[in-house]
């Protein structure tokens, strides 16, 4: 293989399986470490003996990244915006893409990353990863198989830290077993076939194997620290799990970005943390980052990231228009903002990027079918009630007013054009039929009304519930719900649009304390990576039945046993992800879609619309068309470490 060559395997080719093991790599075989070049700021530190020479900081064969447009130049501060105190995933999307594997730009293939190659057993139960030899944590300590084993066996499978192992590392209710073969080889063994594992590893939720440095994070586990109780007391923490979270974080919590001492494998390291009262987060170049460009220049090109924290979207918009942000799509990418951003491109000295949605649904309404109130549970659990609500929504009015006509009525399911698109699942009960909706509500006995025309429950109370929504994150969904509220009032159902901060939204969902919540519906392009709307799969995302999800992820030890249809879908999904053949996998998913359509648990409004963002004109090497997905956490897979400024 030549020094700049790449070996790509498409998702379909890999999933179709091969005879024997599969191994591939994106790592240069040239001797880059010996001739590599580094940022000017580090040259003086090396000369003064404050930093080891670059050849000692890089792996034996650093991963080579081909810049999107051109070889970059060192320097500059990239400015990006966060919204409030719970926007930690805004940092993750920019920086936290350093797993064992990663996505390609097209969101079609898994590429090597900190694992330079791997083998997969014929039955997809064993995955053997060969780590990048000589890669180092940001404090200079070697990254080895010990770190990967520690992260899974000591941390993620620790029942005091995690109530149950994350779904990504378990099959059939049994967690993966990770063992060290040698310093740079580690084997993952599942109890059953897990043909989707590489794809899951490429998503944000697959980052655990590279998240916790053993030499640092082991200090906060009782197994490794006999004096941990004293450390907990000295730190003022309530218990050791709280101290561990504060020091080492997790994939999706703010404390991941709040400890300047924690070693990481990211292109930039925390200098000014994301903590209470902070007005900005600052990250600076990691001197031990393990990637170089095709001419041997150590990445990243950009010196520093500055995440300004705004308290409202209006401030973010003003910062964009005045040229104070270099790349931004998060929070500003609602259609109502696009005319303003288009008109001010010259003033703000930026260009627009196009984001292709992977979501199925722009607004998915999740009635809590496991509600703590038996009366509400009975009503929400009635499929006829849900059908009536769906037919009581004037979707075309919503599309015309909120989305400027740029969508179409849609429930859920893979997007039109996807090989697994299923018309029944996506289009049923989307016609606006208030007469039929009223008739259905009468049929299930909700015939009595109060003086305001609101139907009464069997206990005489009016049918009223709140739908939780985060206005700072999804302002369009607030507008959608206001229209839905008016539509439902006409069929005798009273609803409150319940706006709240993101942290409270998640807390209510986690505690099963919500009536209903909204979010964009997942699974449009990645139906197997995020099937949260097809059955109760995601412990936070399947908001119509979180206790069913907990039952599934804990193999029945926690949560609440779901109905038979859900259990069938859970079993079918486990069989689908144990199947390497894509066509066979599609057959399993078709059965899941059938059961999902018949159960009709969630109510969709319209197909997810394309989005956009801005890029300052002097910021280059940025793809101007990107997937827009949590599974492809834009812009991270576009490799911001190779973004560069021009003069």
Image (cartoon, helix red, strand yellow):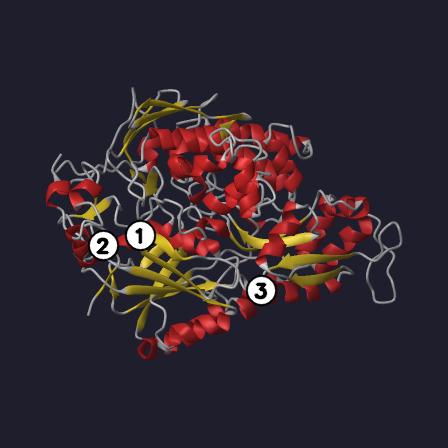
Asked whether 176 or 528 is in front, the reply is 176
> Is residue 320 something that shows in the picture?
yes
Classify 10 Å Cα crowding around label 1: few (below 14), some (14-19), many (20 and above): many
Label 2 close to label 3 by CB (< 8 Å): no
- How far is mark 2 from mark 1, CA to CA? 8 Å
State the image coordinates of residue 427 (x, y, percent, origin top left).
Answer: 57, 50
Label 2 close to label 1 by CB (< 8 Å): yes
State the image coordinates of residue 473 (x, y, percent, origin top left).
Answer: 53, 61
- How far is mark 1 from mark 3, CA to CA? 28 Å
Q: Quadrant of the C terminus?
A: bottom left
Left or right of residue 375: residue 256: left
Asked whether 643 or 461 is in front, the reply is 643
Asked whether 1 or 612 is in front, the reply is 1
Q: Earlier in the sequence, mark 2 or mark 3?
A: 2
State the image coordinates of residue 406 (x, y, percent, origin top left).
Answer: 48, 64
Name the residue tied to disc 1: 638
Name the residue tied to disc 3: 471
Name the residue tied to disc 2: 68
Q: Quadrant of the N terminus?
A: top left
State the image coordinates of residue 263 (x, y, percent, origin top left).
Answer: 37, 44
Classify 10 Å Cα crowding around label 2: few (below 14), some (14-19), many (20 and above): some
Secondary element at image label 2: loop
Answer above or below: position of 417 versus 19. below
Q: Write down the quadrant of residue 3 in the picture.
A: top left
Secondary element at image label 3: loop
- How far is mark 2 from mark 3, CA to CA? 35 Å
Q: Earlier in the sequence, mark 1 or mark 3?
A: 3
């Amino acid at each position: 293989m030549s020094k700049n060559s790449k070996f790509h395997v498409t998702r379909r080719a890999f999933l179709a399986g091969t005879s024997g093991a599969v191994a591939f790599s994106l790592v240069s075989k040239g001797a880059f470490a010996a001739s590599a070049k580094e940022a000017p700021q580090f040259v003086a530190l090396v000369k003064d003996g404050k930093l080891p020479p670059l050849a000692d900081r890089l792996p034996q064969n650093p991963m080579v990244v081909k810049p999107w447009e051109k070889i970059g130049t060192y320097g500059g501060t990239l400015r990006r915006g966060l919204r409030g105190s719970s926007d930690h995933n805004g940092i993750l999307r920019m920086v936290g893409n350093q797993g064992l594997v990663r996505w390609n730009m097209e969101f079609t293939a898994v590429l090597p990353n900190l694992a330079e190659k791997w083998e997969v057993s014929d039955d997809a139960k064993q995955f053997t990863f060969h780590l990048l030899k000589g890669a180092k944590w940001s404090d200079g300590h070697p990254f080895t198989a010990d770190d990967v084993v520690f992260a899974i066996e000591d941390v993620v499978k620790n029942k005091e830290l995690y109530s149950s192992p994350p779904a990504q590392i378990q099959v059939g209710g049994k967690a993966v077993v990770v063992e060290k073969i040698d310093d740079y080889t580690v084997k993952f063994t599942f109890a059953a076939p897990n043909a989707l594992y590489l794809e899951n590893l490429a998503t944000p939720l697959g980052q655990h194997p590279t998240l916790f440095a053993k030499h640092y994070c082991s200090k906060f586990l009782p197994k490794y620290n006999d004096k941990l109780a004293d450390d907990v007391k000295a730190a003022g923490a309530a218990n050791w799990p709280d101290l561990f979270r504060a020091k080492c974080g997790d994939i999706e919590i703010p404390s991941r970005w709040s400890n300047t001492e924690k070693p990481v494998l990211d292109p930039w390291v925390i200098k000014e943390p994301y903590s209470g009262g902070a007005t900005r987060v600052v990250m600076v170049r990691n001197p031990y980052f393990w990637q170089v460009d095709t001419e041997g220049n150590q990445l990243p090109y950009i010196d520093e990231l500055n995440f300004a924290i705004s308290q409202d979207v209006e401030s973010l918009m003003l910062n964009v228009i005045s040229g104070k942000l270099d790349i931004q799509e998060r929070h500003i990418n609602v259609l109502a903002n696009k005319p303003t951003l288009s008109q001010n491109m010259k003033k703000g000295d930026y260009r627009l990027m196009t984001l292709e949605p992977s979501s199925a649904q722009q607004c998915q309404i999740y009635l809590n079918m496991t509600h703590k109130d038996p009366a509400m549970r009975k009503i929400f659990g009635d499929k006829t009630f849900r059908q009536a609500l769906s037919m009581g929504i004037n979707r075309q009015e919503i599309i015309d007013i909120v989305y400027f006509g740029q969508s179409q009525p849609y429930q859920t399911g893979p997007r039109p054009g996807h090989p697994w698109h299923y018309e029944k699942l996506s289009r049923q009960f989307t016609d606006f039929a208030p007469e039929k909706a009223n008739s259905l509500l009468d049929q299930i006995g909700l015939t009595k009304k109060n003086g305001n025309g609101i139907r009464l429950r069997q206990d005489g109370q009016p049918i009223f519930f709140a739908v939780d929504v985060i206005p700072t994150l999804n302002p369009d969904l607030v507008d959608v719900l206001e229209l839905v509220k008016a539509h439902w009032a006409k069929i005798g159902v009273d609803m409150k649009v319940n706006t709240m901060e993101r942290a409270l939204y998640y807390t209510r969902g986690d505690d099963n304390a919500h009536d209903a919540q909204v979010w964009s519906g997942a699974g449009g392009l990645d139906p197997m990576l995020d099937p949260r709307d097809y059955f109760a799969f995601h412990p936070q995302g399947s908001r119509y039945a979180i206790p069913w999800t907990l039952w599934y992820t804990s193999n029945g030890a926690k949560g609440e046993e779901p109905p038979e249809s859900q259990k069938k879908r859970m079993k079918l999904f486990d069989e689908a992800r144990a199947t390497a053949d894509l066509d066979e996998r599609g057959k399993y998913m078709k059965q899941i879609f059938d059961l999902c359509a018949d159960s009709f648990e969630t109510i969709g409004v319209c197909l997810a619309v394309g989005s956009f963002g801005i890029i300052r004109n002097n910021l280059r090497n940025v793809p101007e068309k990107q997937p827009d997905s949590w599974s492809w956490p834009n812009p991270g897979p576009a490799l911001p470490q190779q973004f560069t400024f021009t003069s």
